[in-house]
Structures are given as structure tokens and as C-alpha cells.
Amino acid sequence: MPARRLVVLLAVDGSEYSPYVAQVASEQLKDREMDLHILSVVEVRAGPDIEPGMEEEVKKAEAQMLKELQAKIAADYFSFPGVTIVSEVVEGRPAATISQRAESMGADLVVIGTRGRGKLSAAVLGSVSEEVVRNSKVPVLIVRKPQSLP
């Protein structure tokens, strides 16, 4: 009996590390038929780097960059037989949105990266991957940033 088709949510944040997360997921899942959902969550708030009233323009620019990255990831790492791909860029709180989407789509697995900032930094700044692990009702594969990347 053939293996059941997987539903995988790959969370991509647009960092230089995102392609590595996709590569690891691809290597781990290459022999499986799957429905791959590449999800990016845009969260832009006014602050010292963003002038008041410019939030919408920043969101649009970030969303466009993420769509291009998602297309590149799909082509570079998931162009093997048996894979269907849906890419989506949404607005919201990243960890909550990822967990909610995984549950609503019936995902079998969430794949997300972590930079491994350390306990103090994560406690102060928070960690999207840690919050996803705490709140997700489905298994989560966390891909740690390799030491070879800055």
C-alpha cells in the first residue's frame, strides 16, 4: 500500500536562511507525495524604521519579495513528481497565523526555521518557532540555522 499523501506547511520568513530551511525540508520529504503550502506572514508596524503612513507601502513591497522567494523555493527545491504547491502571503502575527493555518488545512507537518539566538535573546525578543511549537496541534520540524551562515 502506498504511503499517504502528506500535507506540509513550510513557513518562509524572507531571511537569507529561508532557502536552507526549504532545502532541508526537500531532502527530508523528497520521496513523498505531498501538498506543500508555502506560507509567509507579513507583520509590519510603524516604528523608527518606518515613517507613519508608509506601513501599507512597506507591506506591499515585503509581500512582493516574499512571493518571488516562494516561487524560487518551489522551483529550486520542490520540482519533483508528486508535489502540488500552493504559495500564500498573508498579514498577521507570524506564530499565531502559522499555527492556525496548519490546523485549518489539516497539515501533517509544519516546517520552520530558527536562528538559534539563545535563551536570553529569545526570552526578550520572542521566538516565532518556539511559539509555533508551543501552540501547534501538529508536529513541527524546526530547522536550525547552520553555523556556516552569518
Image (cartoon, grey):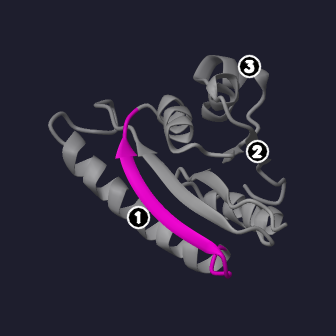
Q: From the image, tell me which residue sits under label 1.
A: 67
User: Dot 1, how many residues are within 10 Å of its Cα: few (below 14), some (14-19), or many (20+)?
Assistant: some
Q: In which quarter of the image is the N terminus?
A: bottom right
First in sequence: mark 1 vs mark 3:
1
Q: Which amino acid does label 2 sit on?
A: Leu
Asked whether disc 1 touches disc 3, contact meaning CB atoms under 8 Å apart, the reply is no
Q: Which mark is residue 76?
A: none
Give the mark toward the camera: 1 or 2: 2
In the drawing, does residue 25 fall left or right of residue 13?
A: right
Q: What residue type is labelled 1?
A: Lys
Q: Residue 36's x, y, as percent?
A: 59, 61
Where 82 falls versus 1 (above or below)? Answer: below
Residue 141: mark: 2
Provide the residue span drawn in magenta. Answer: 78-92
Q: Dividing the picture into quarters, in which one does residue 76 lie?
A: bottom right
Q: Nearer the viewer, residue 14 or 106?
A: 106
Given residues 63 and 46, the one toward you in this image is 63
Which mark identifies residue 120? 3
Label 2 Cα neighbours within 10 Å, binned few <14 / some 14-19 / many ≥20: some
Please state which of the two labelled residues, at mark 1 or mark 3, is closer to the viewer: 1
